[in-house]
């Protein structure tokens, strides 16, 4: 089974580093990128993703509104919020909006690897429980 990950960040460097790292370290993983939530929403309507790495601060559609729309479309998609500006209020807002996890910039490759492994494992358990329907 191929895993599908969508990286949504307005910084091209972040998108490319994450894409390259995930492709090099996770077999059978298809990576898509989007520079904003509006483009990402179109991609989500066209294909199924397992994990979304979502920057909190971007131009266009608000990230929290995007998160709510994603969860309304498919609550099984694992959304990991990423930000360089963190406060307790932002973390709580992300959780209340439906975020599955939260990463602070700058993050290490170990953090990315661990979080993706964790969510791939979680999704695999769900697939087994639901007889591979996800």
Image (cartoon, grey):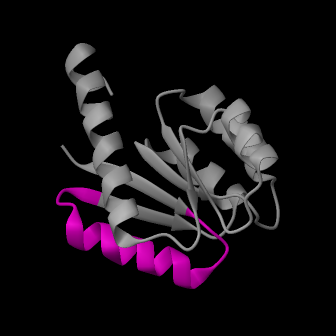
In the image, taking residue 18 as reference, residue 70 lies left or right, namely right
- Whether residue 24 appears in magenta in the rendering, the answer is yes
In the image, taking residue 92 as reference, residue 20 lies left or right, namely left
**65 shown above or below 29:** above
Write the residue at 41% across / 54% down: 5
Write the residue at 32% across / 74% down: 21
**Which quarter of the figure is the C terminus placed in?**
top left
Q: In this view of the protein, which residue sits in the foreground, 82 or 111?
A: 111
In the image, taking residue 63 as reference, residue 1 lies left or right, namely left
**106 shown above or below 92:** below
Where residue 113 sits in the image (x, y, percent)? 31, 60
Q: Read off the magenta span.
A: 8-29
**Which quarter of the figure is the N terminus placed in?**
top left
Residue furthest front as drawn: 88
- Whether residue 23 appears in magenta in the rendering, the answer is yes
Quarter of the image for residue 61 reads bottom right
Where residue 132 sits in the image (x, y, percent)? 22, 23
Q: How many marks?
A: 0
Main secondary-structure element of the magenta-colored stretch = helix
């Amino acid at each position: 089974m191929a895993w599908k990950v969508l990286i949504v960040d307005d910084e091209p460097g972040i998108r490319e580093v994450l894409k390259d790292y995930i492709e090099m370290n996770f077999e059978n993983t298809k990576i898509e990128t989007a520079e904003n939530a509006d483009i990402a929403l179109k991609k989500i309507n066209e294909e199924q993703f397992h994990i979304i790495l979502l920057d909190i601060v971007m131009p266009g559609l608000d990230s929290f509104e995007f998160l709510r729309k994603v969860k309304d479309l498919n609550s099984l998609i694992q959304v990991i919020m990423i930000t360089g500006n963190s406060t307790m209020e932002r973390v709580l807002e992300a959780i209340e909006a439906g975020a599955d996890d939260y990463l602070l910039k700058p993050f290490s490759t170990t953090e990315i690897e661990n979080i993706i492994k964790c969510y791939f494992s979680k999704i695999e358990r769900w697939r087994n429980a639901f007889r591979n329907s996800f």
